[in-house]
Amino acid sequence: MKNRLKVLRAERDWTQAQLAAELEVSRQTINAIEKGKFDPSLPLAFKAARLFGLSIEEIFQDEATP
């Protein structure tokens, strides 16, 4: 799954650890999501969307979607 998490995090000058604390997950989880090695759960995706004030679709996109 493609995502804009790294870009959104960088725009706020947050480290992976800071974003992880905001989302109540580990830094390793943020790293894996940013690298596309792990897809977030639906509750985590909603939490990220609320944190950034965006829709889930604005952050996460299916690889098959052009």
Image (cartoon, helix red, strand yellow):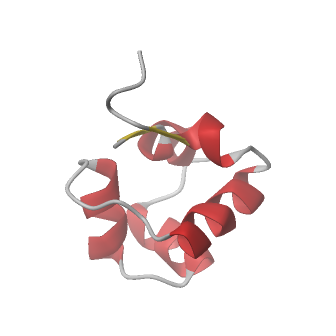
Foreground of the two, 13 or 42: 42
Query: Which quadrant, please, contains the C terminus?
Result: top left
Residue at point 25% right, 48% down? 36
Query: Which quadrant, please, contains the N terminus?
Result: top left
In this picture, is 25 found above or below 33?
below
Residue at point 80% right, 49% down? 53
In this picture, is 47 found above or below 7?
below
In this picture, is 13 found above or below 14?
above
Foreground of the two, 57 or 31: 57
Asked if residue 38 lies left or right of residue 60, the reply is left
Foreground of the two, 41 or 19: 41
Asked if residue 25 lies left or right of residue 56, the reply is left
Q: Residue furthest left?
A: 37
Q: Position of residue 9 (x, y in %)?
A: 53, 48
Asked if residue 9 lies left or right of residue 48, the reply is left
Q: Position of residue 32 (x, y in %)?
A: 25, 61
Residue at point 48% right, 46% down? 5
On the image, which quarter does residue 22 sit in? bottom right
Q: Position of residue 2 (x, y in %)?
A: 37, 37
On the image, which quarter does residue 62 sit in? top left
Q: Residue furthest top?
A: 66
Residue at point 72% right, 61% down? 51
In this picture, is 58 found above or below 33?
above
Tell how many labels: 0
Q: Position of residue 16 (x, y in %)?
A: 40, 63
